[in-house]
Image (cartoon, helix red, strand yellow):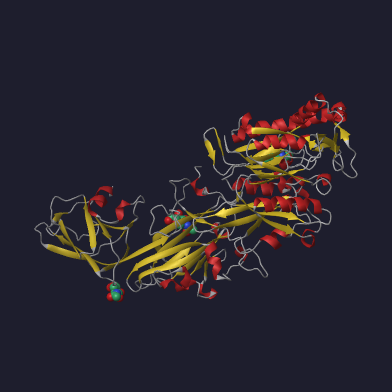
């Protein structure tokens, strides 16, 4: 009902979307009323209620610092002349600028009787303050002043809302642990992992007696956020370099799970107080990632009674999700293990990585204790915000002998760490992160996934038993939201990892990638072709120690093997259909690689599950245009391996170069290949996750 009035007569504050808060104040002809006013809000006074009996007219007068309007709107142009008083006469008061001194503004209402004789006078003594709790709601890395959208969060390029990082790296290298695990700032460099929040105030040197500012969070949010304050922030225009000279004690803890509400000083004059907000945990099943922080101005009532808030400002943050990086992103560093028996493999990897121009990090046996499955123990990802970003390793609950590597070797300054703890009994081979992959960006029936979709392997959907990725990890992955996961069927494999039958490589055309799938059908087709061209006697596994060579004819005559591979092809085809549907792929986006499997008995369950018959070429490492592929040891034709030749011809069309790496003895025989034995830290996406349309 006051819309009309406020628009016509109140300047300054009303370009805003937020409705200005309204507070009722008393007018009193007996005692002088003292009011602390917050710029951007309204005071509403009922003229009739406070009028002396038999008042018929009123007039209003005020200092130039005060604006007001009258409802219903009077005919008179000057409010100094008596205006008829009616039962619903209301005065709406505001001030557009902060006061320099306490009580420096004044508004008075005079009441008149029938004959315009003066009956009484009510005086308001006003002090105005400006209060704004500010965050980077427009996501440009700068904390702007009083963004109208700071109290809510919206996805998309036209969205808004501030962003918080989980402070999961460790500034300390000695006695390190993720910074979020301690409730103090041990190094000033830690501030860059936090989101700046600024309390801007303007007003007299101090607040009127008894008034105070408090900051608060809810019990629920307190598990996810901590707020520190900079003591040095009574200086306007603080620069970071200046801040770095201060000591740790200059950043007192303001809010935490122990302290949900705390008074913050009012500095007086024109002031900016800087706060640092720290995220403590990632979105998960029980946490949607949103947290809010309130700042209230409290008014004293009288001693013994609690103060009441007369103004509250609210800001909202969303905790940045953990994001995975697909094969199509630029590599930074390649990780492999060195064991006493993998010299041949390491040599191949060294050459490939050097040729491609990336860094190679070798985890030595003293750390890996013989566990060579670098892919399985961890997944690299990152977190991103407008002010900062850094890589974060997700540590698998697999916990093989490599279990200490992510924490001991990777966690550090600007390298974060996160894990999910599962019960030992719930952890299976499907919890290894060879079973956790991510697609390149896709668009599916008009829905965009500009950062791709996470892919995991689970038991067949209708199976009542079977192995699954543990629930705590699945819940975590789904809660990140920005790379909505797809569950494939991988339990048909003995090891059970999706990377045993699929991968993605970059491509210059179409969707800028191809899905590569292992295909027994493609394998049989190739072998039949060899036989038809008179190469039935060509032998697989030739020259390998302790490995019985087999001819192409042997393979084609083995009905049992054919039956097993028909089953495997049907399992892969089921996944192929899911991938086509969930990633919006056409058959032209998929390349079938000639790979055969065989079934072996699972010692734990007595069930038969699949393993690769010869090195599983799809289990490759993708470094830009260079592919490191398990050397298949296929049948040779004119001195060249027919499987390698086929692989190269399929990849060359995409401008990719194949390097075959001998992993036979040290990986293939242990049921893994090149991809299982390596890991790649990659550059993040250029795309900003908060620009996703959800
Ligand atoms: C403002 O007015 C109140 C109420 O009369 C009084 O208590 C207070 O001292 C005044 N402040 C100043 C600075 O004059
Ligand atoms: C913050 O303020 C909003 C409205 O101003 C209120 O709904 C919410 O409960 C407050 N939260 C806390 C933690 O005080
Ligand atoms: C395995 O996980 C999937 C995906 O979350 C779920 O749909 C399925 O019910 C689970 N299966 C079993 C057997 O637990």
Name which residue lies at 81% across and 59% down: 369
Name which residue lies at 74% across and 60% down: 404
Q: Position of residue 28 (x, y in %)?
A: 25, 64
Determine the residue located farthest toward the top in the rendered image. 532
Number of marks: 0
As drawn, 332 above or below 498:
below
Name which residue lies at 48% across and 59% down: 293
Determine the residue located farthest toward the left in the rendered image. 115
Q: Nearer the viewer, residue 467 or 287?
A: 467
As drawn, 439 above or below 569:
below
The image quadrant that residue 508 belongs to is top right
Left or right for 694, reference 143:
right
Q: Nearer the viewer, residue 507 or 109?
A: 507
Left or right for 68, reference 554:
left
Name which residue lies at 65% across and 54% down: 358
Q: Nearer the viewer, residue 489 or 599?
A: 599
Query: Is there any visible trace of residue 451 in the rendered image?
Result: yes
Q: Position of residue 198 (x, y in %)?
A: 43, 64
Q: Position of residue 220 (x, y in %)?
A: 56, 56
The image quadrant that residue 134 belongs to is bottom left
Q: Position of residue 238 (x, y in %)?
A: 42, 70
Left or right for 124, reference 358:
left
Determine the residue located farthest toward the front in the rendered image. 638
Query: Is there any visible trace of residue 31 in the rendered image?
Result: no
Left or right for 413, reference 458:
left
Q: Nearer the viewer, residue 11 or 138?
A: 138
């Amino acid at each position: 009902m006051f819309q009309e009035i406020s628009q016509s007569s109140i300047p300054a504050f009303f370009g805003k979307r937020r409705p200005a808060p309204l507070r009722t104040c008393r007018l009193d002809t007996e005692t002088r009323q003292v009011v602390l006013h917050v710029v951007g809000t309204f005071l509403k006074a009922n003229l009739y209620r406070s009028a002396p009996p038999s008042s018929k007219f009123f007039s209003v007068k005020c200092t130039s610092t005060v604006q007001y309007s009258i409802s219903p709107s009077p005919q008179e142009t000057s409010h100094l002349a008596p205006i008829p008083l009616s039962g619903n006469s209301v005065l709406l008061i505001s001030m557009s600028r902060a006061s320099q001194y306490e009580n420096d503004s004044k508004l008075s209402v005079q009441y008149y009787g029938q004959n315009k004789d003066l009956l009484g006078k009510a005086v308001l003594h006003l002090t105005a303050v400006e209060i704004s709790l500010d965050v980077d709601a427009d996501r440009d890395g700068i904390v702007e002043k009083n963004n109208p959208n700071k109290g809510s969060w919206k996805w998309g390029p036209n969205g808004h809302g501030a962003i918080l990082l989980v402070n999961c790296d460790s500034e300390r290298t000695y006695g390190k642990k993720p910074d979020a695990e301690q409730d103090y700032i041990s190094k000033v460099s830690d501030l860059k992992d936090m989101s700046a929040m600024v309390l801007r105030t303007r007003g007299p040197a101090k607040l009127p007696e008894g008034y105070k500012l408090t900051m608060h969070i809810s019990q629920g949010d307190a598990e996810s956020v901590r707020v520190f304050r900079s003591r040095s922030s009574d200086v306007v225009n603080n620069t970071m370099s200046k801040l770095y000279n201060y000591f740790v004690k200059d950043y007192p803890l303001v809010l935490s799970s122990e302290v949900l509400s705390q008074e913050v000083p009012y500095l007086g004059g024109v002031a900016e107080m800087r706060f640092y907000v720290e995220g403590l945990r990632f979105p998960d099943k029980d946490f949607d990632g949103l947290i809010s922080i309130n700042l209230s101005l409290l008014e004293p009532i009288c001693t013994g009674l609690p103060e009441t808030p007369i103004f509250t400002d609210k800001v909202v943050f969303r905790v940045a999700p953990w994001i995975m990086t697909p094969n199509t992103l630029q590599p930074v560093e390649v990780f492999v293990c060195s064991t006493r028996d993998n010299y041949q493999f390491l040599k191949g990897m060294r050459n490939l990585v050097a040729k491609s121009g990336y860094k190679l990090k070798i985890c030595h046996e003293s750390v890996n204790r013989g566990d060579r499955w670098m892919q399985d123990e961890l997944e690299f990802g990152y977190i991103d915000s407008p002010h900062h970003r850094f890589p974060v390793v997700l540590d698998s609950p697999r916990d093989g002998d490599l279990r200490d590597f992510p924490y001991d070797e990777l966690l550090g300054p600007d390298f974060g760490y996160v894990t999910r703890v599962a019960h030992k009994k719930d952890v299976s081979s499907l919890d290894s992160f060879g079973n956790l992959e991510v697609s390149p960006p896709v668009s599916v029936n008009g829905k965009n996934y500009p950062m791709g979709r996470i892919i995991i392997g689970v038991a067949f959907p209708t199976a009542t038993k079977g192995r699954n990725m543990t629930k705590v990890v699945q819940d975590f992955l789904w809660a990140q939201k920005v790379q909505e996961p797809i569950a494939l069927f991988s339990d048909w494999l003995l090891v059970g990892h999706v990377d045993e039958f699929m991968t993605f490589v970059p491509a210059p055309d179409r969707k800028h990638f191809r899905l590569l799938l292992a295909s027994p059908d493609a394998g049989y087709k190739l072998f039949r072709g060899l036989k038809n061209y008179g190469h039935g006697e060509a032998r697989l596994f030739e020259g390998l120690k302790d490995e019985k060579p087999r001819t192409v004819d042997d393979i084609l005559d083995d009905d049992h093997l054919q039956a097993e591979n028909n089953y495997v092809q049907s399992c892969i085809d089921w996944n192929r259909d899911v991938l086509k549907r969930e990633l919006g792929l056409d058959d032209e986006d998929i390349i079938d690689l000639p790979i055969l499997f065989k079934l072996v008995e699972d010692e734990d369950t007595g069930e038969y599950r699949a393993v690769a018959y010869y090195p599983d070429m799809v289990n490759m490492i993708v470094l830009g245009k260079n592919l490191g592929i398990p050397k298949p040891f296929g049948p040779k034709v004119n001195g060249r391996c027919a499987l390698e030749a086929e692989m190269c011809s399929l990849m060359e069309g995409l401008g990719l170069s194949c390097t075959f790496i001998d992993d036979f003895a040290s990986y293939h025989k242990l049921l893994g290949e090149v991809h299982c034995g390596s890991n790649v830290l990659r550059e993040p996406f250029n795309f900003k996750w908060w620009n996703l349309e959800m």
